[in-house]
Amino acid sequence: LATGVASAVALPVTGIAVGAYQIARGVGNSAEAVKASKQGMQWDHEKREWIFYYLDKEKEELDKLEAEKNAGKTASGEAASADTAERKVKDRAYYDLLNVSTNATAGEIKKAYYKEARKVHPDKCPNDPEAAGKFQALGHAYQTLSNEQTRAAYDKNGPAETGNADAAVMNEIDPYVFFAVMFGSTLVEPYIGELWIATTADTVMKDAVSQQQMMSEEENLERMQEEADDIAGKVAMAEEAKLKQRKREVKIAMNMRTRIEPYMDGSVAEDLFVLGCQEEAEKIAKGSFGATFLVTIGTALQLEADEFLGFQKSFMGVDGHMTRMKKRANSVQSNFKIVSSGLKAASAGRKVYKEVESAQQKVVQAREQETLKAASAAVEGTATEKTAEEISKEEKEKEETDAAQAALAAAKIEESIPAILELAWAVNVRDISRTLRKVCKKLFSDASVSVEERQKRAVAVRIMGKEFFNVGKEAGGTMPIKTDTGDIKARAEVAVMTTMAKAQGQEVSEEDTEDLIRQAKTQAAAEAELNKEKEQETPQK
């Protein structure tokens, strides 16, 4: 009984003591955090300590990692392979075109391509009628060898066969170029970098190529090895994706630091800086989806600047906490938008699949009935031999039915495009907001300048965000995106053409792509009008 009473007393007392210790520790850590934050320090989650962050130092670190990667070295700096002997490959024609060894690193291949491209570029060889063909072949060779997956497939199987033409085309499509054209993000690239959706598409395409290579394997041992390599490759790609995102954030931070430098050093007065931001925003607004980009970027920059200044200047950081609540509300709204858009896209996709499948089943059933009818007639002895004209007529009808099915499928897919675009934009908005949050953190935490200078950076960023948002709002950036199916189709077609052209080394400017999109829309509208006229004339005949 005495032991029980002692335990009943000791346990609550112990709990109170532990709780008091944790509270005291939390208060102490909070005080330390407030002090460190005021000094502009950052919490390092890996080292578990407060540190001073330097933007230029991180840039140097990333450049070093990139140089080691291009030189084919490991993170420790040791050579990846000391073997200088030529590797055995199925075909070495592409290596010979670039004049490199089969052991060439990614950096050596890139350097060789630029060297050889200057020799055969059509502009450099106006008197050589074969220059264009040589330049195109060289570009194809580089595109194949510069990609780890396509290079491995080439080394093992040689050039892609005719049956694999679709895969070859897919390999030459650069997702970054495609989405830059699709969403018109070239003008805002200094502030958003390469969109996450493009990086994801690149990873998906690489996975698809890897899967295609695995499907061609026949021996189980080789298949198992391929699967093991695939798992290791996915881990490596995940690390590569993190590194890409980190490089993206640092690059944007450097761009923004350069952009606000005239305001920081006083060479441009605030009113002129504001005017410059307005002019830049108006130029961006004229581009495709420019207004939406401006609102998204402007909102993110204002919130990040207000949060930083709120914690730095307001009493007990009250304004900072208020802004953080706004950020969380925006984040919840953004996530909800992605979920709702995803449901719409999924619903649209299911509807398309069901309608197309239903139409196909009707055709199959009709053909099965015709087959059964013919078989029944043969059994009963009432069948008659078909003439060549009848056979030709049936084949023509079959072709027309198949064409109609293809047209129906295309039309139904077009109906789902707006829902897919809405989802893509919801993903883009969250991606841009998250990226700019980390960008601003780097910019406002850069210990290479004083805390006062960092606060001035935040003021400059807030000015830029405000002007971007206001111009974007006036241009309709806060309204739902207009989903013109014709415009989307034209953009997709031009995006594919542009990325294929750039893969062959051709220069295509944003003005060129916009002209091509306008031409594609005009041509599509003319074809649609012509088809409409034909449909109206058909009943009269």
Image (spheres, rainbow, N blue to C red):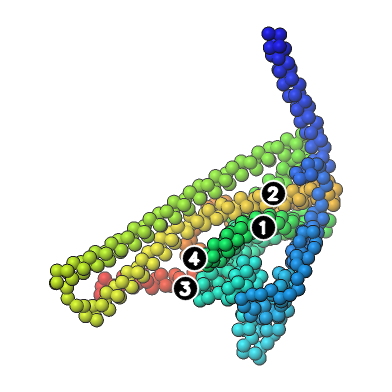
Q: Is residue 79 left or right of residue 493?
A: right
Residue 98 screen position, x and y as percent: 69, 79
Q: Amino acid at mark 2?
A: Arg
Alpha carbon separation for disc pair 1 and 4 = 35 Å
Q: Nearer the viewer, mark 3 or mark 2?
A: 2
* Residue tagged 3: 523
Indicate which disc, 4 or 3, sits on the residue closer to the N terminus: 4
Alpha carbon separation for disc pair 3 and 2 = 42 Å
Answer few, some or many: residues within 10 Å of disc 1's Cα (few below 14, many 20 plus, some between 14 and 19): few
Q: Amino acid at mark 4?
A: Lys
Indicate which disc, 2 or 4, sits on the residue closer to the N terminus: 2
Indicate which disc, 3 or 2, sits on the residue closer to the N terminus: 2
Q: Which mark is residue 489?
A: 4
Indicate which disc, 2 or 1, sits on the residue closer to the N terminus: 1
| Point 65% across, 84% down: residue | 122
Q: Amino acid at mark 1?
A: Ala
Front one among 80 and 463:
80
Q: Nearer the viewer, mark 1 or mark 4?
A: 1
Secondary structure of the residue carrying tag 3 is: helix
| Point 82% across, 55% down: residue | 57
Residue 394 screen position, x and y as percent: 27, 74
Q: Is residue 65 left or right of residue 480?
A: right
Answer few, some or many: residues within 10 Å of disc 3's Cα (few below 14, many 20 plus, some between 14 and 19): few
